[in-house]
Amino acid sequence: MYAYDELDRTLINERVSEFRDQVKRRLSGELTEDEFKMLRLQNGVYLQLHAYMLRVAIPYGTLSSKQLRRLAHVARRYDRGYGHFTTRQNIQFNWIKLAELPDALADLAEVGIHAMQTSGNNTRNVTSDQWAGVAPGEIEDPRIWSELLRQYTTLHPEFSFLPRKFKFAITASAHDRAAIKIHDIGLRLHRNADGETGFEVLVGGGLGRTPFIGKTIKPFVHGHDLLSYVEAILRVYNQYGRRDNIYKARIKILVHELGIEKFAKEVEEEWLQMRGSALAIDDSVIEDIRSRFAYPAYEKLPHMPDELKKAAHDPHFEAWRKNSVALHKVSGYAIVTLSLKPVGGPPGDATANQMDGLADLADKYSFGEIRVGHEQNLALPHVARRDLPALWRSLDKLGLATPNVNLVSDIIACPGLDYCSLANARSIPIAQELTRRFANHDTANLIGRLHINISGCINACGHHHVGHIGILGVEKNGEEFYQITIGGRADENAAVGTLIGPAVPYGEVADVVEDIVEAYLALRARPDELFVDTVKRLGVEPFRERVYATRQER
């Protein structure tokens, strides 16, 4: 956990006070909604279909138990008793009254949580691997660099009014759990041939109306030069990015239109002018940030304790352990992923009671720390393996022990037309129906790793483009239809999925997904060939034939 200092606390409190005055002027009529819009967006407040929505930042996905309890308090006191965890490691509250927003933000500020820059044309929440600091084989904890970027970009005067929103993601592991290739800037921490720590820098990734996979602009930037190189990218984007057309304003469009070579040349020229400036990061700065991350006092524990051996006879526990428990870099400990995708539930939602209960379990079993992943699940990063059976029993009572992590019912979905004023179609009911269709654990295990992503509109908040199966809601003559893509992925081999054919109506979506899954089971070369690998090997056509032949027969 990172320890925030007095400067951070002062900044957050002053921001709350400033926003309280802005809300007061809006309620009195001194500010129109149009005048208020820019101010509220910079504080994470959206006006949705039914109410204002507050999006709260969880920098690089790390929460303390104290902070999670405060989120539960906000859900209970100001909302309708739940929050929605998002693909940007944030949490959203969908029913907060405008007059109460400043009080909610003040309550959050007391525990070091804010909503600054979770919206608007600025740099958004810096995201990272939810297993950062505990994943075996990672170069080093990427949250150190995430925190450096957070401090640097927060309320940066030059980059608070960019052509469009701007997103960072950082990973330090061979397997990319942060989806860096679909971000405006993606950073992969690695070491060069001389053993120096630095970053592969990717630019121009992003989904939405025009999806692109990020391209490598520089294979290695030394850690000391990270801020100056990032600033060079942002300056080039700020100068050349389109402001006359919102659909062409993202950096991905600029990179595409200029070409990666031309864009890289512009950045390099800008960077060389500032490389040795005050933006060069001294070792002492990095070490100061590193020192603010408190790591647990791990015990020396056996990898296979008696408690785990005994619990192995319970098939329900074993199903959960095999699905939701991962290796930790410290022997005797484990990383536990908690699915927020129960059968029939809205993906990513957690009730206030669940958040309070999980905070208690984090104190008891995970040194008071919780993580948020971009897959809309949570994790406890420091669980002693001897405690896994007891933790499982407690999680089961909270409804947080569904053993479907990375399986077909572990669905990513945006709020869709149930909440969002931009959406064309519903996302949540589709996800709920699919979890019911694939509720059988044996069937889900037979299918294996398969990610379904659902978006209610082209803005792609559900990351449908990079789902193994992607579902996009569109509107046709006032009715909800859905386009289906297959073969997308968001990991180190990131790819945009391919459309299989015409959009299908709302009532047929779950049937189509079942047809695709059945085709995969018949077509895969062996039981351990993943769905995306089968699609890559055979292409889309066999799946298209199965889906639309089935539709014609009906």
Image (cartoon, helix red, strand yellow):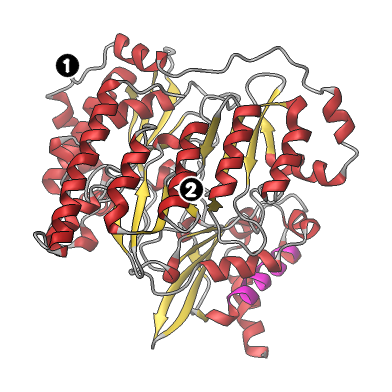
Mark sitting on residue 80: none
Residue for badge 1: 276
- Determine the residue located farthest toward the top in the rendered image: 284
Label 1 secondary element? loop
Q: Residues within 10 Å of mark 1 (few under 14, many from 20)?
A: few
Residue closest to the eye, 95 or 242:
95
Q: What is the three-letter code of the residue carrying label 1? A: Gly
| 72 on left or right of 312 | left
Query: What predominant SS class does the magenta segment belong to?
Result: helix
Q: Residue 197's spot in the image, x, y percent?
A: 40, 18
Residue 275 in the image: above or below residue 162: above
Residue contact between numbered discs 1 and 2, judged by CB atoms under 8 Å: no
Q: Can residue 470 be seen here?
A: yes
Mark sitting on residue 494: 2
Q: Is residue 286 magenta?
A: no
Q: Residues within 10 Å of mark 2 (few under 14, many from 20)?
A: many
Q: Residue at x 27, y 34 (%)?
A: 12
Q: CA distance from mark 1 to mark 2?
A: 34 Å
| 400 on left or right of 82 | right
Closer to the N terminus: mark 1 or mark 2?
1
Q: Quadrant of residue 153?
A: top left
Q: Residue at x 72, y 20 (%)?
A: 332
Label 2 secondary element? loop
Q: Residue 127's spot in the image, x, y percent?
A: 41, 38
Q: Can residue 85 be seen here?
A: no
**Magenta highlight range:** 509-521
Residue 147 in the image: above or below residue 337: above
Q: Residue at x 52, y 66 (%)?
A: 428
Q: Residue 313's spot in the image, x, y percent?
A: 91, 38
Q: Is residue 519 magenta?
A: yes
Q: Residue 477's spot in the image, x, y percent?
A: 38, 88
